[in-house]
Amino acid sequence: MNLLYEETMARIKTVSRTQTQTELAKLLEVSQSSVAEAKRRQSIPADWYLKLFEKLGVNPDWLKKGNGPVYLRTEAGYVPSDGDGPPI
């Protein structure tokens, strides 16, 4: 079992509020088999990070490594990468 994959998927499920592969696939606009294949390979496709950023404003670095703020984008705009300061 790939611990990095498991930790990243746990973060993805938390921020996306999905519990099943079907729910996650719908959010990411991919097939359920794509989610199953990622699990089988223990590897998250790069475009998932971009989609989660675009849809939810989630920080890709936080998703992948648990570093930095959870969200980079708020309703007011983008937040600098360190998470401090006013939205841009």
Image (cartoon, rainbow, N blue to C red):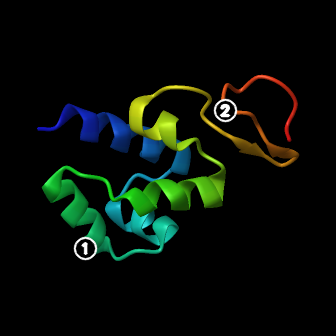
Dot 1 corresponds to which residue?
33
* Residue visible at 64% across and 53% down in the picture: 56
> In front here: 56 or 23?
56
Callout 2 amino acid: Ser
Callout 1 amino acid: Ser
- From the viewer's perspective, is residue 57 above or below residue 85? below
- From the viewer's perspective, is residue 51 above or below residue 76? below
> In front here: 15 or 5?
5
Image quadrant for the N terminus? top left
* Residue visible at 33% across and 59% down in the picture: 45
Locate residue 38, reporting x and y percent. 24, 59
Earlier sequence position, callout 1 versus callout 2: 1
Packing grade of label 1 (10 A; few <14, some 14-19, many >=20) is: few
Locate residue 64, reporting x and y percent. 40, 38
Helix, strand or loop at mark 1: helix
* Residue visible at 36% across and 39% down in the picture: 8
Locate residue 34, reporting x and y percent. 28, 70
Residue 76 appears left or right of 83: right
Q: Which mark is residue 81?
A: 2
Quadrant in the rendering for residue 30:
bottom left
Q: Which mark is residue 65?
A: none
* Residue visible at 45% across and 28% down in the picture: 66
Residue 58 appears left or right of 1: right
Q: Are marks 1 and 2 in contact (CB under 8 Å)?
A: no
Marks 1/2: CA–CA distance: 33 Å
Image quadrant for the C terminus? top right
Helix, strand or loop at mark 2: loop
- From the viewer's perspective, is residue 78 above or below residue 68? below
Quadrant in the rendering for residue 32:
bottom left
Locate residue 82, reporting x and y percent. 67, 25
Quadrant in the rendering for residue 69:
top right
